[in-house]
Amino acid sequence: LKRNCPRKMKYQGAFVIALLLCVAAVADEIQPNIYTASNVVKSSTGITADLTLTTSADTRFGSSLPNLKFVASYDNNYQVHIKITDASTFRWEIPIDNSHTISQGDLSNALYNVDIQESPFSFSVSRRSNNEVLFTTDSSTITSQEYFYFAPQLIQLPTSLPSTSQIYGLGERIHEFKLYNQDDYYVTFALDNPSPYDNGKAPGKNMYGPHPFYLESRTNNDGVTYHGVFFANTNAQDAHLTQGNLAWHSVGGIVEMYFFLGDEPLDVIKQYQTLVGIPMMVPFWGLGWH
């Protein structure tokens, strides 16, 4: 870690980006946090479980947290909410009011399934219609050597991706419409770069606003399917895209994710905007660089 991290950083933004670069430098050296799930409770509205660390704590980013709480909430038929938090100490989380998206009716027609494996712990979200796994932390499916990790100064959350996966979003940046997946890092931290082109290579060249949301399309026997994932975290973050894998890193906070399943891309975006709010229309002269 010392070998890969700069010793002096003048500005806070540079410090955060350097920290993310340090994470990138040692990501494949970090041993996975192996947790076991217990007290698993499944109901018609979600799943809860207690997670206990069963491996030695890695201390490079603070000691790995020994006890976590897993909660999956079935908000409505197309939206599922996942949280993994420190079971003993409060960590900052965004005070999102999602009550307006929670259905009080029948969820038997939900478009998704959520499953957890107890030992070693992993969770997955899949599409009910064809059982296609949309997101999984199962280490046996991860080929990038980036595994689930939860420490005070680093959260690492990986998933495998099929060969037909196309990822869009993770703004704000100037880039081709589709994001690269050739060992590319996309930083979501407001750097106020004036007019950069972000080629996915370090250091990050993102712009004014962090938008940790991506839209994914997949081609399968059902044609093309779409879903979105929102990482509700305000800390400095990045997403590491490789062929067959996506790993999300954050330097703090908690794991909080929303999954949106829709028939078309517009449906997914509408579901996301229903949760976070509709953007305000600004005057033409206020668009700045654009």
Image (cartoon, helix red, strand yellow):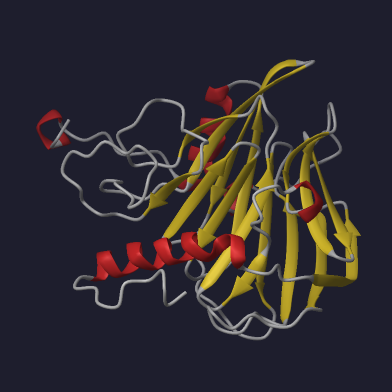
In the image as oriented, which residue stretches furthest toward the front? 3
- Give the residue drawn at x 22%, y 39%: 196
- Give the residue drawn at x 39%, y 51%: 188
Q: In this view, does 274 lie to the left or right of 206?
A: right
Residue 10: name its quadrant.
bottom left
- Relative to 94, does residue 90 appear above or below in the rendering? below
Front position in the image: 157 or 80: 157
Q: Is residue 220 left or right of residue 23?
A: right
Front position in the image: 74 or 84: 84
- Give the residue drawn at x 48%, y 59%: 24
Q: Quadrant of the C terminus?
A: top left
- Give the residue drawn at x 18%, y 38%: 195
Where residue 47 sits: x, y (%)? Answer: 82, 59
> Does the image show residue 51?
yes
In the image as oriented, which residue stretches furthest toward the left? 285
- Relative to 185, does residue 220 appear above or below in the rendering? above
Where residue 7 sits: x, y (%)? Answer: 30, 78
Q: Is residue 88 left or right of residue 34?
A: left
Q: Count the marks.
A: 0
Residue 40: name its quadrant.
bottom right
> Does the image show residue 255?
no
Front position in the image: 279 or 233: 233
Where residue 72 sits: x, y (%)? Answer: 75, 57
- Relative to 154, does residue 82 appear above or below in the rendering? above
Where residue 177 sits: x, y (%)? Answer: 41, 25
